[in-house]
């Protein structure tokens, strides 16, 4: 009896392993084709983005007034990029041992496009921060984050 159970289990595993992937994949009954197209999602509801990690730069000798001015320009740049639909997510990071300060997630075709946007940011121009760039694959629904955020943000920056 025990051998029969093992034989059945092995047979099922082999059948699943040899079965074409499209037969095993389950269609999502809640799939919204129109929304998936609008957000440019693939069959998995995912798409490619550019992730930028901002880290402490080589310049750090700024007065309080200079820092405030640089960060005011930084926030204005973030708002401009978000309003244009290029920047999907941005935010600061907590203290860490890698000197990472924040992230940007851009909905652009390539790293060069993201570099152009980041190069215009006052924190980069001043040398207060530097940027690292990565290709990233995430949910196409991220594009909806800013629309939702505007509905839940009680105070602006």
Image: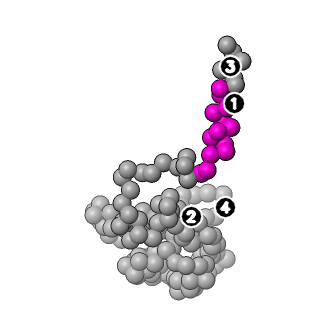
What percent of the width, then of the height, locates residue 157?
36, 71
The 10 Å Cα crowd at callout 3, few under 14, some 14 to 19, many 20 or more, is few
**Left or right, 92 with reference to 55:** left
In this view, the residue farthest toward the top is 1
Q: Are marks 2 and 3 in contact (CB under 8 Å)?
A: no
- Above-or-below relation of 46 to 64: above
**What's the colour scheme?**
one colour
Q: Which residue is mark 4?
A: 98
Q: Are marks 3 and 1 in contact (CB under 8 Å)?
A: no
Magenta span: predominant SS is helix
Query: Is 112 in front, or is 141?
Result: 141
Q: CA distance from mark 2 to mark 4?
A: 23 Å
Q: CA distance from mark 4 to mark 1?
A: 48 Å
The 10 Å Cα crowd at callout 1, few under 14, some 14 to 19, many 20 or more, is few
Q: CA distance from mark 3 to mark 1?
A: 10 Å
Q: Which residue is mark 3?
A: 4
Magenta range is 8-21
What percent of the width, then of the height, locates residue 25?
53, 49
Query: Is 99 in front, or is 87?
Result: 87
Q: Which residue is mark 1?
A: 10
The 10 Å Cα crowd at callout 2, few under 14, some 14 to 19, many 20 or more, is few
Q: Which residue is mark 2?
A: 137
Q: Nearer the viewer, mark 2 or mark 4?
A: 2
Kindly tell me whether residue 3 is visible in this rendering: yes
Looking at marks 2 and 1 on the same chain, the residue that comes earlier in the sequence is marked by 1
């Amino acid at each position: 009896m025990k051998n029969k159970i093992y034989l059945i289990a092995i047979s099922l595993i082999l059948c699943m392993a040899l079965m074409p992937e499209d037969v095993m994949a389950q269609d999502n009954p809640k799939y919204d084709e129109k929304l998936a197209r609008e957000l440019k999602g693939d069959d998995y509801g995912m798409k490619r983005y550019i992730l930028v990690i901002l880290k402490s730069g080589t310049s750090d000798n700024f007065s309080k007034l200079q820092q405030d001015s640089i960060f005011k320009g930084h926030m204005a740049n973030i708002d401009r990029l978000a309003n244009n639909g290029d920047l999907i997510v941005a935010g600061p990071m907590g203290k860490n041992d890698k000197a990472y300060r924040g992230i940007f997630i851009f909905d652009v075709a390539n790293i060069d496009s993201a570099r152009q946007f980041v190069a215009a940011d006052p924190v980069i121009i001043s040398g207060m921060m530097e940027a690292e760039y990565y290709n990233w694959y995430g949910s196409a629904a991220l594009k909806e984050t800013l629309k939702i955020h505007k509905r839940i943000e009680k105070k602006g920056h």
